[in-house]
Amino acid sequence: MDVATLARAGEPFFTTKGVGKGTGLGLPMVHGFAEQSGGRLVLKSRKGKGTTAELWLPAAPKSPVSAMAADPPSPPISPRPLTVLVVDDDSLVLTNMAAMLDDIGHRVFEADSARKALSILRREKDIDLVITDQAMPRMTGTELISAINGERPGLPTILATGYAELPPETDPLQPRLAKPFRQHDLVQAVEQAMTEPSERRVLKFSAC
């Protein structure tokens, strides 16, 4: 990898592969596992030479006292459980986002297309929030949100996108979640989207 690619290799959803051929979740998952275990992932790479991935983990404690050092941090807790519909045509991204929401106590429905999302919305009347990807075939996220506003006016929505530029007709107050993102960014986006429309701000969270 070149220097720029190596610097971003651990970012969620970052990939050098074409659309539909990679999710950019492999290394971030390994990185997260290492950090949660008290270790770290070390990547070394030279373009044209090869890449070495080192996974450093702490040795097992020798006594019960050291094993009880500290509890791992708890996942963020949502103020109230919601029923959330998540829409993304990439199955791994869809599963990962649904897992993040389930982890903080929300009930989740998954749809891999805008058409399926509308079908679920018509069937499930208790959905509180929709989170949709922008770049989807046949119907984009902004087009889906427009359709939702026509059928379920006032239903909160979040547009998750890795693109800075959106169609000019996009509502400037439309809550957005910039890819890549981490769980705490998702929590903030959900909280913001559930406020009154007059209090909303455009969200541009990104992984640090």
Image (cartoon, grey):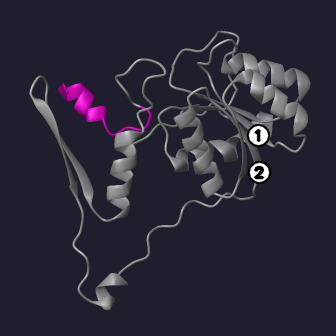
Give the camera-side residue of 91 and 100: 91
Looking at the image, can residue 154 be seen?
no
Residue 66: x and y in percent read 29, 85
Asked if residue 166 lies in the magenta stretch, the reply is: no
Q: Which residues are magenta?
A: 1-13
Residue 10: x and y in percent read 33, 40
Asked if residue 2 lies in the magenta stretch, the reply is: yes
Looking at the image, can residue 27 be seen?
yes
Identify residue for label 1: 129
Q: Quadrant of the C terminus?
A: top left
Question: Horizontal placement of 161 versus 52: left or right?
Answer: right
Please, which residue is most extreme toward the left here?
Answer: 49
Q: Secondary structure at mark 2?
A: loop
The reply to whether dot 1 and dot 2 touch (C-beta < 8 Å) is: yes
Question: Horizontal placement of 199 versus 149: left or right?
Answer: left
Amino acid type of the residue that numbered disc 1 sits on in the rendered structure: Leu
Give the camera-side residue of 16 and 185: 16
Question: Horizontal placement of 54 versus 91: left or right?
Answer: left
Residue 135: x and y in percent read 58, 18
Image quadrant where residue 153 sits: top right
Is 31 situated above or below 72?
above
The residue that appears at 67% across and 57% down in the rendered structure is 78
Local packing at callout 1 (Cα closer than 10 Å; few below 14, some 14-19, many 20+) is some
Structural distance between the alpha carbons of marks 1 and 2: 8 Å
Q: Secondary structure at mark 1?
A: strand
Dot 1 or dot 2: first in sequence order is 2
Is 53 situated above or below 123?
below
Amino acid type of the residue that numbered disc 2 sits on in the rendered structure: Leu
Give the camera-side residue of 106 and 21: 21
Identify residue for label 2: 82
Q: Quadrant of the N terminus?
A: top left
The residue that appears at 70% across and 11% down in the rendered structure is 169
